[in-house]
Image (tube, grey):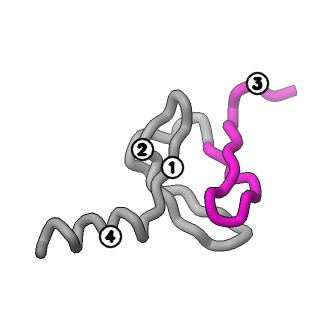
Amino acid sequence: MGKRGKIQHIRCPMCRETIEIPRDTERDDVVTCFECDGEYRVVSLKPVRLRSLDEDEWERDMEED
């Protein structure tokens, strides 16, 4: 049997399906929801928190204006 804690699970903010977060994931890595194809940047590991890449792009565009 594998080690516990190998993969963390979090709900996709968009469709509520489960996204698997591998144990070796680091802050600022990008993960994808395979159900809705949403892409998210990992902004925190404990607890795991995600931010939509679309939201990141929107904030960058606002800073440039």
Q: Quadrant of residue 5?
A: top right
Vertical position of residue 14 compared to residue 47: above or below: below
Disc 3 marks which amino acid? Answer: Arg
Q: Nearer the viewer, mark 3 or mark 4?
A: 4
Disc 4 marks which amino acid? Answer: Glu
Crowd class of label 4 (few under 14; some 14 to 19; many from 20; radius 10 Å): few
Q: Which residues are magenta?
A: 1-21
Q: Name the residue beneath numbered marker 2.
A: 43
Q: Position of residue 52 (x, y in %)?
A: 47, 62
Q: Is residue 15 left or right of residue 55?
A: right
Disc 1 marks which amino acid? Answer: Leu
Q: Name the residue beneath numbered marker 1.
A: 50
Q: Position of residue 65 (x, y in %)?
A: 12, 75
Residue at image coords 67%, 45%: 10
* Residue 57: mark in rendering: 4
Outermost residue, right direction?
1
Q: Nearer the viewer, residue 64 or 35?
A: 64
Which of disc 3 and disc 2 is earlier in sequence?
3
* Residue 4: mark in rendering: 3
Disc 2 marks which amino acid? Answer: Val
Which of disc 4 and disc 3 is earlier in sequence?
3
